[in-house]
């Protein structure tokens, strides 16, 4: 019966039921024929099974409801039918995901339109993530726009336990869009007021490292902090973004033209050009372990020439010291 439901063979499903087929039987994943019909968008089979007593509130082994399966399939008629017969948009699966998350991630725009008004804000808060995150993660800009039009906050953060499940501890929908190199979704989120500086690993660093000039320009134009740090890999005042741009002159100049603090490139924790040494406060030493400057050894002349051009004051000091030594 599961296979007949998957293929949308309503006559075969009816024949099986007539001859004693069990419409509540589960497969190896705990899914009933009703769930299969919902997932594959066969509305006629779905309605027939409901009329024959199929339980629309039954869940699979992973906690997914029939409506959740329908949200994954994306057929708006199936979703409307399940809602008509009492399906709930507020039942999460064991991962905490709601049908609205599934539809947003898969990019099912029409399904999402049905689910937005039947999903409570409290259920979304309890889930630990917004469908805004799901739409950005799935690279679905049209769904993002729909959610934004319906008042969803583009700056809402992932719950702590979800954020910590990622190595980079990402928190925002914007981070998902940037890490996917999704220019359109990035622009939509920024235009809607997304803050580019809310993640532990700044979105700008992700875009610079990916050599995505267009996203870097977008982020900078909407206030991304060009002098941001990724504290886990930086033991100097050398801002992190430039570490990823040393082999890309266009990217390097893009950062410099947007206010990159060139002075910090020459602010060494081991001493200055006059031989004066200094120590950072203990707290800063604890926060910034581990990174060395060997990355600039491949092409130091070109890099320093560019940086000096953006710091005439430092250039004059270097020239003065050279004259004094002579």
Image (cartoon, rainbow, N blue to C red):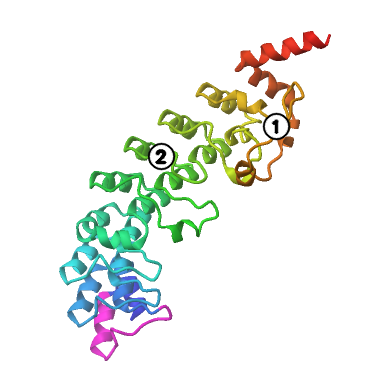
Q: Quadrant of residue 191?
A: top left
The single residue placed furthest to the right in the displayed view is 326
Q: Quadrant of residue 248?
A: top right
- Whether residue 27 appears in magenta in the rendering, the answer is yes
**Whether residue 257 is situated above or below residue 112 in the rendered picture:** above
Q: Residues within 10 Å of mark 1 (few under 14, many from 20)?
A: few
Q: Position of residue 268 (x, y in %)?
A: 69, 30
The single residue placed furthest to the left in the displayed view is 84
Find residue 186 and name its label.
2
- Whether residue 73 appears in magenta in the rendering, the answer is no
Q: Residue at x 33, y 54 (%)?
A: 131
Q: Which residue is mark 1?
A: 278
Q: Position of residue 160 (x, y in %)?
A: 44, 58
Q: Residue at x 65, y 30 (%)?
A: 246
Specify whether 322 is left or right of 21. Answer: right
Label 1, secondary structure: give it.
Answer: loop
Q: Residues within 10 Å of mark 2 (few under 14, many from 20)?
A: many
């Amino acid at each position: 019966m599961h296979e007949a439901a998957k293929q949308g063979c309503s006559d075969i499903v009816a024949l099986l039921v007539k001859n004693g087929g069990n419409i509540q039987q589960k497969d190896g994943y705990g899914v009933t024929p009703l769930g299969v019909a919902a997932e594959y968008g066969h509305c006629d089979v779905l309605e027939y099974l409901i009329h024959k007593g199929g339980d629309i509130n039954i869940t699979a082994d992973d906690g997914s409801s029939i409506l959740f399966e329908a949200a994954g399939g994306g057929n708006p008629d199936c979703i409307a039918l399940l809602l008509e017969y009492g399906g709930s948009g507020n039942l999460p699966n064991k991962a905490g995901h709601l049908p609205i998350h599934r539809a947003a991630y898969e990019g099912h725009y029409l399904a999402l339109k049905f689910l937005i008004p039947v999903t409570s804000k409290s259920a979304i808060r309890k889930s630990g993530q917004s469908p805004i995150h799901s739409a950005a993660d799935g690279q679905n800009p049209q769904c993002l726009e729909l959610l934004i039009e319906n008042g969803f906050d583009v700056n809402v953060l992932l719950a702590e336990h979800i954020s910590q499940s990622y190595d980079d501890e990402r928190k925002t929908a914007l981070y998902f869009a940037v890490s996917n190199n999704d220019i359109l979704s990035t622009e939509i989120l920024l235009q809607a007021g997304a803050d580019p500086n809310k993640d532990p690993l700044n979105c700008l660093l992700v875009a610079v490292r990916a050599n995505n000039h267009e996203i870097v320009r977008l982020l900078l134009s909407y206030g991304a902090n060009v002098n941001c740090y990724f504290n886990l890999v930086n033991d100097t005042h050398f801002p992190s973004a430039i570490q990823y741009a040393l082999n890309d002159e266009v990217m390097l100049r893009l950062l410099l033209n947007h206010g990159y603090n060139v002075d910090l490139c020459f602010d060494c924790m081991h001493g200055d050009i006059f031989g004066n040494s200094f120590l950072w406060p203990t707290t800063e030493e604890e926060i910034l372990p581990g990174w060395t400057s060997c990355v600039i050894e491949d092409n130091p002349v070109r890099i320093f020439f560019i940086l000096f051009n953006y710091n005439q004051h430092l250039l004059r000091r270097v020239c003065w010291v050279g004259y004094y030594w002579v």
